[in-house]
Amino acid sequence: MASLESQISSLRDELATVYKTQGQNAQRLLAMNETLREKEELCRSDSENLRQAREEVIMFKRKVDQHNELMLEKDRTAQILHDEISTLQLELGQIEERNQMLTKDNAKLLQRWLDDKQAQVNRMNEANEFYEDMRSRHQAVLNWMDSDSDSRITEHKERGGNIDIDASTCDCIIDNGNEIRAESEM
């Protein structure tokens, strides 16, 4: 019996050791389960972060694509505007050239007009001088006629001449066989 008791005692010790080991294993299992749960939680968190990162990547790719499309549209618009600017600069150059030609033509036309007006002024001055000359001659004839008018007119009429004076037109016609005519032009 002593061997049985020693066996029982040994078995109890083994059983205690097994329980102890089982308890330690259960503790380790709980710790491992806790670690597994933490790792799974961390994995879920990492998976969620990865999912969000992938969504952000997709969103950023869309934004990049939209930005690229926008840049392409802006490039096309810039090219169109550049072409329009080139066309407008060409048109502006043609208009400036035309304006320069018109300015030169206008200057020539103005100079011709001024020359024509100067010629008209000169002719008018000559006509005024002629008119003043004729007026003074007319006045001289009238003065001559007034001073000796009676005697000379009588003498002239006796010789058969006619004297017609039209003061309104400054025509003076003395007719005694020869005609002398002085007309002023206004």
Image: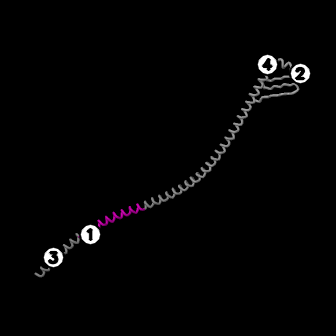
Judging by the rendered image, the residue that carries numbered circle 1 is: 32
The image quadrant of residue 173 is top right
In 3D space, how far apart are the residues under numbered discs 4 and 1 (Cα atoms)? 160 Å
In 3D space, how far apart are the residues under numbered discs 3 and 4 (Cα atoms)? 187 Å
Tag in front: 1 or 2: 2
Judging by the rendered image, the residue that carries numbered circle 2 is: 159
Q: Which secondary structure lies at badge 2?
A: loop
Q: List x then y, in percent, for residue 5.
A: 12, 79
Region of the chain picked out in magenta, as a range = 28-57
In 3D space, how far apart are the residues under numbered discs 2 and 3 (Cα atoms)? 196 Å
Judging by the rendered image, the residue that carries numbered circle 3 is: 13
Of mark 2 and mark 3, the one earlier in the sequence is 3
Of mark 2 and mark 4, the one earlier in the sequence is 4
Which amino acid, mark 4?
Ser
Overall secondary structure of the magenta section? helix
Judging by the rendered image, the residue that carries numbered circle 4 is: 147
Crowding near pointer 1: few (<14 within 10 Å), some, many (20+)?
some
Which amino acid, mark 2?
Arg
